[in-house]
Image (cartoon, helix red, strand yellow):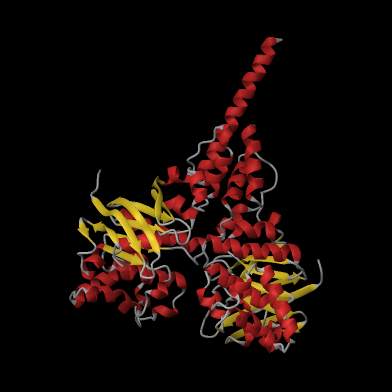
């Protein structure tokens, strides 16, 4: 793994008008090319944490900040969000909140035109981003609101990717989607993981897929980071996750219970199929 | 104990104004006090069916009867007190300036006297766990979990016998999902018939006694949840993925693992039983070999 691209150093944040701190002394380092999954119950500070990574916090929200966040060498207190965003892309959970234009093509070109790139370069980048997100050519003329939830979210991701950011942050990209939409978006994440050296930071409740995609898992709870570990280690302590309202995939819980009973002594499976194999070994006796 | 019929759907066909055929010849009977899940992929007809039951849509052909009366003959006021529909996005439903007015809106439309309106608002708020301090706040500025409760309370204040909740757990975390579902279970215990429309199979497995699977506008499966989830081939055609414990049991079927498991606990028990059977067979085989010598 490469050099750190995001450094969060003893970060405290309190929204104006609130008496509780949303983040309380958070430290986190994300390295170049890493895939990081951030989990934790709602209201635990996940969105606040990722918004602090591209400068949305403190620059676009009112509140009190202590500590520092350094994104690609830029201290977020000293740079504008617009500048940081060119290199740290952000995808919101509700894609409609980020659409600004009337067609998918305009949506994808919007950020690029603001970079004042040549037309040819814009065209190439749009084609490239559409390929990764598996958007068909004939989508270009459509208004974003005519698309399905999964398609909209892929357009939102493509618009961010087209900027060729070093880091892409996705805040619950699948939480409002149906199962097909969720799968579509996860396929894009899998592709990014496999074929592109972009750093991905994703906040996600659905752990089934994150478990085997992530290099590093982060548990945020009540404004504090309680655990940072590679998935194998992160999911090893199932009761700890359950105590903090993080519900691991049920196959992991089943294997954990068999381990407690002494019928299995190996690792917690990160994939469903691995879990079934473990159960099969136990059943065979 | 047997209960009366709450809902009868007879040969229901529904065509949207743009010509889309959303439901074709659907039949369904629901008894009072049932807890049912409607599942199926988007476009399968599950939401159209639930809106027909709530009287928000009227059948193109066939009919829907609520406690014996056809929805075509019922007035909005009668509908509202028999079937309540909670929208997937609480913001599609919330429009008043305070939580109190939001919950009071329905009862006021029933032209109830203001003291009874107040009684119903407080009762509904208490059931959903909204304390009085929220009553004068704007519902729009509450966290999503609480907005969802306001939406449910505003339906409860009408005291409908049947409550339909569209995607009760979307955008909620696990803890909030369990809270909402436990609350629906509590209402079910009070005598309400509950229908949830959802994609969350763990939630269906945990809470719904009966599951209706919709596919292409038709009812594909209808029965006790554990039996429905055991229909792997049909579910695959409907693009429905049963919960992990059910799928794991299916993968282990050749070892005699029971096929109607829904929960982790049941799966683990079944695996341990099969393990013991294997051990016994081995011991027997061992004894046989010994005696042969």
Q: What residue appears at the point 51 percent right and 85 percent down from the top-left corner?
A: A17
**Image position of A106 (left or right of B16):** right
**Image position of A272 (left or right of A17):** right
Indicate whether B293 appears above or below B184. Answer: above
Residue situated furthest right in the rendering: A2
Indicate whether A280 appears above or below A56. Answer: above
How many numbered marks appear?
0
The image quarter in which residue A282 lies: top right
**Image position of A23 (left or right of B173):** right
| Residue A77 is at least partly visible in this image | no
**Residue B2 in the image: x percent, y percent?**
25, 44
Q: What residue appears at the point 28 percent right and 63 percent down from the top-left corner?
A: B83
Q: Nearer the viewer, residue A80 or B76?
A: B76
Q: What residue appears at the point 35 percent right and 77 percent down from the top-left corner?
A: B99
Q: Quadrant of the C terminus of chain B?
A: top right
**Residue A212 in the image: x percent, y percent?**
68, 56
Q: Quadrant of the N terminus of chain B?
A: top left
The image quarter in which residue A209 lies: bottom right
Indicate whether B26 appears above or below B99. Answer: above
**Residue B188 in the image: x percent, y percent?**
33, 55
**Residue A138 in the image: x percent, y percent?**
60, 73
């Amino acid at each position: 793994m490469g050099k750190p691209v995001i450094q969060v150093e003893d970060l405290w944040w309190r929204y104006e008008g609130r008496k509780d701190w949303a983040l309380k002394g958070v430290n986190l380092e994300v390295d170049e090319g890493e895939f990081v999954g951030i989990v934790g119950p709602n209201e635990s500070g996940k969105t606040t944490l990722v918004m602090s990574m591209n400068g949305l916090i403190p620059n676009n929200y009112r509140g009190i900040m202590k500590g520092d966040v350094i994104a690609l060498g830029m201290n977020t207190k000293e740079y504008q969000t617009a500048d940081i965003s060119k290199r740290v892309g952000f995808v919101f959970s509700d894609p409609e909140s980020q659409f600004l234009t009337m067609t998918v093509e305009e949506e994808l070109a919007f950020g690029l035109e603001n970079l004042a790139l040549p037309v040819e370069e814009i065209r190439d980048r749009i084609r490239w981003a559409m390929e990764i997100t598996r958007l068909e050519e004939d989508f270009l003329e459509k208004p974003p609101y005519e698309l399905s939830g999964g398609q909209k979210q892929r357009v939102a991701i493509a618009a961010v990717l087209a900027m060729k950011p070093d880091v892409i942050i996705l805040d619950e990209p699948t939480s409002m989607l149906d199962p097909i939409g969720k799968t579509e978006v996860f396929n894009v994440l899998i592709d990014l993981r496999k074929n592109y050296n972009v750093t991905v930071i994703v906040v996600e409740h659905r752990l089934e897929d994150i478990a085997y995609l992530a290099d590093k898992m982060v548990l945020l709870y009540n404004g504090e980071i309680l655990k940072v570990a590679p998935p194998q280690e992160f999911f090893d302590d199932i009761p700890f996750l359950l105590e903090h309202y993080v519900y691991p995939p049920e196959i992991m819980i089943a294997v954990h219970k068999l381990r407690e009973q002494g019928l299995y002594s190996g690792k917690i499976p990160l994939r469903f199929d691995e879990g079934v194999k473990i159960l099969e070994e136990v059943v065979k006796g | 104990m047997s209960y009366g019929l709450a809902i009868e759907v007879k040969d229901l066909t529904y065509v949207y104004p743009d010509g889309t055929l959303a439901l074709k010849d659907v039949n369904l009977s629901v008894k009072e006090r049932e807890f049912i899940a409607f599942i199926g992929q988007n476009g399968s007809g599950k939401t159209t069916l639930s809106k027909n039951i709530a009287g928000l849509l009227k059948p193109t052909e066939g009919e829907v009867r609520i406690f014996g009366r056809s929805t075509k003959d019922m007035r909005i006021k009668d509908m509202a007190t028999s079937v309540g529909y909670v929208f997937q996005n609480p913001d599609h439903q919330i429009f008043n300036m305070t939580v109190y007015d939001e919950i009071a809106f329905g009862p006021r439309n029933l032209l109830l006297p203001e003291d009874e309106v107040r009684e119903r608002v407080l009762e509904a708020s208490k059931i959903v766990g909204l304390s009085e301090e929220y009553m004068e706040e704007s519902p729009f500025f509450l966290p999503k979990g609480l907005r969802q409760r306001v939406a449910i309370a505003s339906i409860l204040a009408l005291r409908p016998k049947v409550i339909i909740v569209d995607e009760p757990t979307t955008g909620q975390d696990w803890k909030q999902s369990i809270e909402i579902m436990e609350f629906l279970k509590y209402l079910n215990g009070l005598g309400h018939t509950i229908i949830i429309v959802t994609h969350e199979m763990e939630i269906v497995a945990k809470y719904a006694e009966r599951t209706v699977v919709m596919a292409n506008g038709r009812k594909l499966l209808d029965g006790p949840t554990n039996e429905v989830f055991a229909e792997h081939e049909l579910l695959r055609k409907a693009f429905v993925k049963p919960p992990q414990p059910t799928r794991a049991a299916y993968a282990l079927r050749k070892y005699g693992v029971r096929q109607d498991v829904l929960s982790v606990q049941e799966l683990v028990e079944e695996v341990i039983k099969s393990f013991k059977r294997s051990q016994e067979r081995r011991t027997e085989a061992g004894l046989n070999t010994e005696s042969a010598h």
